[in-house]
Image (spheres, helix red, strand yellow):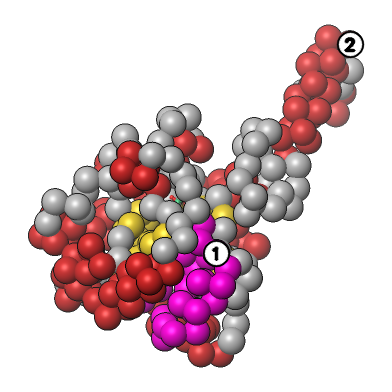
Amino acid sequence: MTVPRFVEAKRQGRKLSILTAYDFLWAGLLDAAGVDALLVGDSLGMVVQGKRTTLPVTLDEMIYHAEMVVRAVKRALVIVDLPYMTFQISPGQAVENAGSIIKRTGATAVKLEGGVNQAATIAALSAADIPVMAHVGLKPQSVLKLGGYKIQRDAERLLADARAAQEAGAFAIVLECIPRGIAKTITAELAIPTIGIGAGPDCDGQVLVTQDMLGLTGNWSPKFVKAFANLAEQSRRAVERYIAEIESGEFPGNEHSHA
Ligand code: KIV
């Protein structure tokens, strides 16, 4: 998968599938299953590190995880999040840090949260030939200002953000937690693919956190998450069986023992 092919999918009317990946094992599995792109999201701060927000994630941590993901991938596009305060200070800061990600991980593209407010930065990245995906709607790095993770409903502002990102040179745009009607309008207006998460079925593609869609993350998940499996329950049962078989002497049997 390349950036031009990713963008071309929209013209061809082919829906794009993206999942998050943070390590070698999962990246290999997801890539082999055929997803179009893997996002090394700063959601790793919550999913992998157990933190309450994505804000503490550092550039070095993103590079550490992205490098493992890239090593496993044979086909998918790998996109890496620019974490909090690695691009907000200036376009120059963004180019330097995004350049570091590309150089040190071998990933193909970066993602940053912002629209109108980050247009100059998206343009600077684009001018430096770094493919950039924008992210508008609910921006988790703005959680302090927003006072929580809330659905974003200001249609005018969302459309302005999406237009600004496209004009500045973004090759695609994530729409997070916005009403499906607004996502449909934005998708119809833009030439670049829209990738929805909690933005309804009319986007050009979808992204979910892998651990959410596999039913690995806790008892609560947002309305937009569909659990396609219940791996938490299956894993718990497997571990309980392992413990029971050790206690009963059933494991290891002859077939698992050296003569
Ligand atoms: O960090 C992340 O995983 C993301 C996606 C959920 C869009 O930004």
Observer able to see residue 221: yes
> Residue 91 appears in which quarter of the rendering?
bottom left
Residue at disc 2, CB closer than 8 Å to ligand 1: no
Is 195 placed above or below 241 here? below
Residue type at tag 1: Pro
Q: Is residue 184 magenta?
A: yes
Report the magenta residues as a range: 170-196
Observer able to see residue 207: no
Which mark is first along the chain, 2 or 1?
1
Q: Is residue 87 left or right of residue 143?
A: left
> Residue 36 appears in which quarter of the rendering?
bottom right
Q: Secondary structure at mark 2?
A: helix
Residue type at tag 2: Ser
The residue that appears at 51% across and 57% down in the rendered structure is 177
> Residue 169 appears in which quarter of the rendering?
bottom left
For disc 2, the marked residue is 248
In which quadrant will I find the C terminus? top right
The residue that appears at 22% across and 45% down in the rendered structure is 85
Q: x, y (%) of residue 205? A: 56, 71
Quick one: label 1, few (<14), some, or many (20+) residues within 10 Å? some
For disc 1, the marked residue is 179
Q: Secondary structure at mark 1?
A: loop
The residue that appears at 23% across and 58% down in the rendered structure is 98
Nearest to the observer: residue 186 or residue 2:
186
Q: x, y (%) of residue 111? A: 35, 60
Q: x, y (%) of residue 184? A: 54, 76
Q: Is residue 251 magenta?
A: no
